[in-house]
Amino acid sequence: MIRRPGRCQQRWFASAPPRSTIPNEPPTAVPAEGPSIQSDSPRGEDVSTTHFGFKTVREDEKESLVGKVFGNVARSYDVMNDVMSGGIHRVWKDHFIRQLAPGPDTHLLDVAGGTGDIAFRFLDYTKNTHGSAANAKVTVVDINPAMLEVGKQRAPEFGYGNASNIDFQVGNAENLENIPSESVDAYTIAFGIRNCTHVDRVVKEAYRVLKPGGRFMCLEFGRVDNPLISTVYDAYSFQVIPAMGQLIANDRESYQYLVESIRKFPPQPVFAQMIKDAGFTVIGQGWENLTFGVAAIHSGFKL
């Protein structure tokens, strides 16, 4: 069973809900996106496009482009998250699992979770909270084999090297063909959904695989509403993070994409509506801001 949240309690790392206005994107040139671009095919058919950071690319190209980014950063994933969040991602993820509050028999599907950050926290929580009664299990799905390999290598460090209650699978969040309908109690995706080509399809797949009463939870970077904090955050994002990527991982481009992908992800109210449109029931506004909206936890129930 998954505990339903009561009234949100403000924490030192949480902020008030954003105003209805959405701040402008940072003063970086953003190419205009259109519904299609001209194909190189002899017939000259129009093809659907999407964004890859601030670039406009063909939809059928984005998956491989994102795959290259995460193939590049897989080995330094923790360092990447520390750079992207100033180290506070660890606090966010701990809070994320506490808000999920899984029961002793919860079957969790963690999508885009190849390195195991959420999965290991989930298993630790159920073990520490429910003791010998814990019979929880987690299926980790990621489209990138390099990320999954990191998770498998990290499992022994967390005491789950030979555990039967954790499984790693290659899979696409937009089409979880190996996950039966109504088969899991909870679905989580942390800092992964913004990299998917069709975010709406990801949420609809989450609804399909969840059992009635199951819970969808997403932890993702968000929009900062406070103008002063937004200015500081934008300066850090666009001036410091890519430079740190170059310094730490000799990979400025991947970190530049990751910063840009945050700005292209729907703001909190828009994403909350997408969750409702997929069929989920949300409580209150549907999300909780963390650190002034730098990140947000979105939640919905399949009722």
Image (cartoon, rainbow, N blue to C red):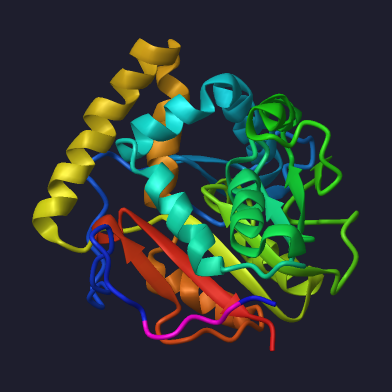
Could you tell me residue 118's position as x and y percent?
59, 48
Could you tell me residue 247's position as x and y percent?
34, 11
Name the outermost residue toward the left. 228
Q: Quadrant of the N terminus?
A: bottom right
Judge by depth and name the residue closer to the eye, 158 or 186.
Answer: 158
Judge by depth and name the residue closer to the eye, 294 or 100.
Answer: 100
Number of numbered discs:
0
> Is 191 rendered above or below residue 248?
below
Residue 101 located left or right of residue 47 = left
Could you tell me residue 190's position as x and y percent?
55, 51
Give the quadrant of residue 259: top left
Specify whether residue 4 is painted magenta.
yes
Q: Main secondary structure of the magenta part?
A: loop
> Is 228 rendered above or below residue 256?
below
Judge by depth and name the residue closer to the eye, 290 or 33.
Answer: 290
Residue drawn at the location 63% of the way across and 44% of the way down? 120
Judge by depth and name the residue closer to the eye, 227 or 120.
Answer: 120
